[in-house]
Image (cartoon, rainbow, N blue to C red):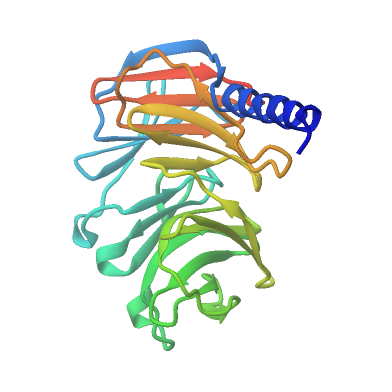
Amino acid sequence: MSKRVQKFLFSFLIFCTINAISAQNSSVSPTLLSHFKNNFDEFLGFDAFGYSYQIKNNVFSKVKGNELFEYKNVSLGKITKVDLQNPLKIVLFYEDFNSVILLDNQLNKMTEINFSQNPTPIVVTAIGMSTQNQLWIYNTLNQQISLFDYLKNEYKTVSIPLTEPIKYYQTDFNTFFWIDKKNNWYSCDIFGKITLLGKIADFDKVVLVSSSQYLFAKDNLLYFKGIDKSNPNAISEIKILEKTFDNFYYKEQILSIFTATDISNYKIVTP
């Protein structure tokens, strides 16, 4: 190999290394909007109408100013999951009793579903609101993603059996997203089409922003990452004030950081 070629290869290697390092070390600096005390066991986020949602002593509540709505159901045990996509039809999931409660905007019970009483055997470990009076569910008995019409009490399987356990999931009305134990990121639409979206970085907690972007926490640091084929190592640290935190929430460019005593809300524009 000639010295000229060696020099070119060496320069190219240095260029690639510098670009990879700069991509990995880039950062996002959000703007602090508000900060207040956290008196709840679990803070769940906000809706478009300015209400906040939280859980304390297994009581689900909705608050804005002097307005307070609460719902509790001691017979179903601990609330496992809350879906706030539709604030007029909120989903509470009680995994220990294989049951779901649907609440209206004043947290009155609209519907109660016990999947153990369904003619088709169903054991639910993941759930979310879908379209046309349907719920997304993951049935561990057949390891398939399904849709359940809660008005007609109709159940239909939409996906093939999953080969790996679900590590994390998130839903919107049209899509069931999940990350498996190998950190592979998938989506399934209402017609059952499964798409591999990419590989997720190792995380302690994660929130999916879109089908190509996500926020994740690792070792008390918060990051933004996009699935960029041209630059797969691109990652940005989000510079928040908190040195440690219990959880975080993101919706429509508002990032909420929860600690045991405080809640901070930031305005963030992802790259």
Q: Is residue 111 visible?
A: no
Q: Quadrant of the N terminus?
A: top right
How far from the left and from the top, in percent, is residue 179? Answer: 49, 56
What is the x, y in percent for residue 9? 73, 32
Looking at the rendering, which quadrant does residue 56 occupy?
Answer: top left
- Please tell me whether residue 180 is drawn above or below residue 118 in the rendered image: above
What residue is shown at x 40% (from left), y 49% (from top)?
82
Q: Position of residue 86 (x, y in %)?
A: 56, 47
Residue 145, horizontal then vertical, whole percent: 52, 72
Quadrant where the C terminus lies?
top right
93 lies left or right of 30: left
Instruction: Decide if residue 219 is on the left or right side of residue 17.
Output: left
**For the point 57% across and 35% down, which residue is it?**
225
Q: Which residue is depicted at the point 40% across and 67% down?
A: 165
Does residue 76 sit above or below 8 in this rendering?
Answer: below
Looking at the image, residue 190 lies above or below residue 43: below
Foreground residue among 47 and 171: 171
Task: Give the mark count.
Answer: 0
Q: Nearer the viewer, residue 96 or 210?
A: 210
Where residue 100 sits, quadrant-wise, is: bottom left
> Which residue is nearer to you in this view: 29 or 35?
29
In this orientation, does residue 6 appear? yes
Image quadrant assignment for residue 10: top right
Q: Residue at x 29, y 25 (%)?
A: 259
Residue lying farthest to the bottom in this orientation: 119
Q: Is residue 36 above or below residue 92?
A: above
